Image (cartoon, rainbow, N blue to C red):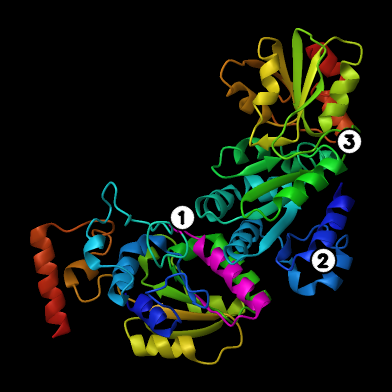
Amino acid sequence: MRQLFKDTMLSLAESDERLVMIFGDISVFLFREYSSRFPDRFYNVGICENTLISIAAGLSSQGFHPVVHTIAPFITERSYEQIKLDMCYNGFGGNIVSCGGSFDYAWDGATHHCYTDLAILRLLPGMEVTQPGSKKEFESLMRSQYDNGRPTYFRIAADEHGEDLPAEFGKGVVVRDAGAEVTVITAGPILKNVLAAVEDLSVNIVYYHTIKPFDADALMPFARTKCLVVHDAFGLHEAVCEIPGISAARHGLPDEFCCFYGTLDDIRAKIGLDSQGIRQAV
Amino acid sequence: MELLLASYKCMKHNPADPTWDARDIFILSKGHGALGLYCTLSHLGYFPMDQVFSFGGFGSSFGCHADRFKVPGIEASTGSLGHGIGLAVGMAMAFKIQGSGRKVFCVIGDGEANEGTVWEALMAATHLELDGLTVLFDHNRSQGRALPIFNPVEKFESFGCDVKRVDGHDIDALCSAIQSERTNVRVVVADTVKGKGCPTLSDEVYAWHRRAPSEEELASLVEELDAAAI
């Protein structure tokens, strides 16, 4: 997905002189073609995430469409007040593209895990929050939102769900309507494990790539079913439970740090987000 | 007040058209000084002074920290320290990319300089050689009781800034420091005294921090100010 991020930005920069890339010293080599073709719109500002956001807001205030890119916990949790005030409260825009969400940086340990980004950002007035689960979703969401002058969060994932689903910003997707009494609600790449877990079970599945604005209408046909949110981050469950008339159980994250290393799949298995763990929860 | 007046004296701006697209930008990063900025903008003709008398009241457009959507001439809503300077860097960067020649002025405080983001922003600004950015450092030593900024000239120079140090109550000296040739981001270390001209205030700065005088005290303070002016 990161490769597609580079290709998409390169393509957009060719036709939009207001696109400016701001890096926190990651993906810089990946963007070498962009930097050589658009040197005045490529800035590796450094490892100063708070300032990356403030700079982006300042650029946006003067008509540019900045795209800030670095690692998820540092650009969201560390820079929350800059996103809140410099972007949202001031009404300045800017795109934040993170990598390393949830447990994508599994072997780096808990300092690099990030599963609150979606939850905290969705609380900010004016903020748009997305979690693309496929290349198609990332490209569609980025192209439709990057120049709207609003603060928008894109979370690039290390893996994908592998499905070809509709990718319209702000729209939930009914992946399966089995007329079942149980509905699993999920978002992002973890859909892959959900599908594997319930392959032979009679359950409905509703999927989201956009966490805010949240498409409540997509869930309404399933409001009277038993709803279970399966997600490897906070935020989706809260969004679901805010819909009047819907209550949902949650399967996902423990209230403790994940203090072990390994691969993304190792972590997911440890906390019950592999297909077996999800199946048991369903 | 002198920092504000000097900045606007050196800026391209138009009170009759606050969003004029060729204007220079002023950011009050030490946002708690908004009342001074309101008075300056009013003095320059952005809006009548009587509006400012609603300061801090429910329904007023003039709060303790300025709201850019409510007050003509306010370019950024500031208040949380260490934010305005980063916005100013982004704006100066925008003008450099555009080649517009527009300039950005930003006032920061010595207390505000306790925030790490001030130094992050300056590192980025000097690395990007944003010589259209002027940062005025209100060196009123408000942090004498906590975390003082010792040797500010050396500190700013070590971050790559082109520094001038002046009497922060001397508008001509401030303008000269703002307008002189520079090699990078210009920082003006402005030595100031909180409550300048009113010994009641300047002798007890912490007692008067965030305190409004009574009518009686106000009359006395104005008398002190008048005496100092004479």
Residue B36 % position (x, y): 31, 68
The span from disc 3 to disc 2 (Cα, nearest Å) is 37 Å
B60 to B203, vertically: above or below = above
Callout in the foreground (1, 2): 2
Mark toward the start of the polypeptide (3 vs 2)? 2
The residue carrying pointer 1 sits among few (fewer than 14), some (14 to 19) or many (20 or more) residues within 10 Å by Cα, namely some
Circle 1: residue type? Ser
In the picture of the structure, the residue carrying the numbered disc 1 is: B80
Counting from the top left corner in percent of width and height, residue A92 is at 56, 56
* Pointer 3 residue: A263
User: Which residue occupies the extreme top position in the image?
Assistant: A181
Query: Are the numbered discs 3 and 1 placed on the same chain, yes or no?
Result: no
Q: CA distance from mark 1 to mark 2?
A: 37 Å
- Circle 2 SS class: helix
Query: 10 Å neighbourhood of mark 2: few (<14), some, or many (≥20)?
Result: few
Does residue A188 appear left or right of residue B9 in this picture?
right
- The amino acid marked with disc number 3 is Thr
Please determine whether, in this image, residue B223 is positioned above or below residue A207: below
Q: Is residue A135 magenta?
A: no
Dot 3 falls on a residue whose secondary structure is loop
Q: Pointer 2: what residue? A: A14
Q: Quadrant of residue B5?
A: bottom left
Range of magenta residues: B77-104
Labels 3 and 1 touching (C-beta < 8 A): no
